[in-house]
């Protein structure tokens, strides 16, 4: 990937180190995971009903797919530019996110933007009242950083990725979060279209793709989760949904540049 000119954020560096481990699992293993974690975890308090909710994400990338290839190569310092929605409700905001991986440490910054202002935010216009759903200095700075990276890379929308997520939070004070993602689907997205937030017959259903287990934790991997991994013989995987979906669309005739 081209050399970056982005400084680390003091906001990120002040936080505890956050890690993320991913595992490809079967639907049967997903049920076993839920049974195992029940004594330790509760459904995500942000989920409206139960633990399951929809996640719909539009990924941006450069003309030569620099972010795609940085993930595919496993570069130690890489990031994603994405816009995420958790519902197709027209009044709900979307989240402009920068997700960065530095070695094994994960950091994420996000700014909430009104759904009807996404095109304005992407166009690089001034952040006027009515763009940000929560107009704080931190969210304004995050949106500016997002656009700075977007403009430097000449990044535009590439693909939308949708799945159903079951999320659980630790009942203890260890900030552990476990998610199980299923029903993965993808959609070519060469430009922004508000219809991208609606799941319909245009989407490619990846029925051959079972589930992704993600374990997020701060500083130290808990012993009880280590026991889960050992008991189910789980093998860590560096899977990135953006990369997987771009490859799938490549098989469907969507152009993916060759690695230079």
Image (cartoon, rainbow, N blue to C red):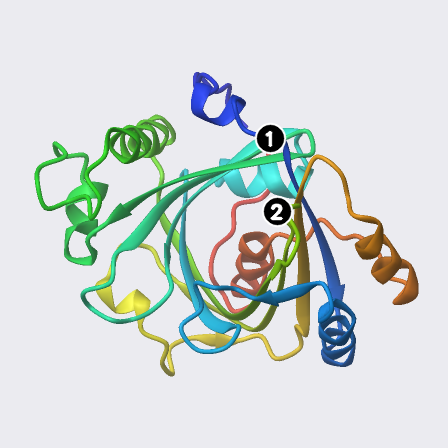
- Return the residue at label 2: 175
Distance (Cα) linking label 2 and label 1: 10 Å
Q: Is residue 157 left or right of residue 43?
A: left
Residue at screen point 44% across, 68% down: 47
Residue 130 coordinates in the image, percent (x, y): 10, 46
Which of 152/227 is in front? 227
Residue 201 coordinates in the image, percent (x, y): 38, 83
Residue 242 coordinates in the image, percent (x, y): 53, 54
Which of 105/76 is in front? 105
The circle drawn on residue 68 is none
Q: Is residue 12 left or right of residue 129?
A: right
Report crowding for label 1: few under 14, some 14 to 19, many 20 or more residues within 10 A (C-alpha): few
Residue 129 coordinates in the image, percent (x, y): 8, 40
Residue 5 quadrant: top left
Residue 128 quadrant: top left
State whether residue 259 appears in this view: no
- Return the residue at label 1: 16
Residue at screen point 33% across, 32% down: 142
Which of 5/32 is in front? 32
Report crowding for label 2: few under 14, some 14 to 19, many 20 or more residues within 10 A (C-alpha): few
């Amino acid at each position: 990937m081209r050399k970056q000119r982005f400084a680390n954020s003091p906001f990120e560096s002040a936080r505890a180190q956050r890690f993320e481990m991913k595992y490809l699992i079967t639907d049967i293993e997903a049920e076993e995971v839920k049974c195992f974690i029940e004594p330790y975890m509760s459904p995500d308090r942000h989920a409206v009903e139960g633990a399951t909710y929809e996640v719909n994400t539009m990924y941006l990338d450069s003309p030569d797919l620099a972010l795609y290839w940085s993930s595919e190569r496993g570069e130690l310092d890489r990031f994603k530019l994405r816009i995420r929605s958790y519902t197709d409700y027209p009044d709900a905001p979307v989240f402009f996110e920068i997700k960065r991986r530095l070695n094994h440490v994960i950091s994420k910054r996000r700014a909430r933007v009104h759904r009807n202002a996404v095109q304005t935010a992407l166009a690089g216009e001034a952040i006027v009242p009515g763009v940000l759903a929560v107009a704080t200095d931190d969210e304004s700075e995050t949106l500016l950083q997002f656009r700075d990276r977007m403009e430097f890379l000449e990044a535009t929308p590439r693909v939308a990725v949708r799945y159903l997520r079951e999320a659980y939070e630790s009942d203890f004070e260890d900030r552990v979060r476990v998610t199980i993602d299923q029903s993965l689907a993808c959609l070519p997205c060469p430009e922004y279209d508000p219809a991208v937030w609606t799941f319909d017959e245009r989407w490619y259903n990846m029925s051959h793709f079972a589930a992704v287990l993600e374990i997020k934790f701060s500083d130290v991997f808990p012993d009880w989760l280590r026991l889960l991994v050992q008991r189910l013989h789980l093998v860590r995987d560096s899977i990135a949904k953006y990369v997987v979906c771009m490859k799938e669309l490549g098989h469907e005739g969507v152009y993916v540049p060759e690695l230079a």
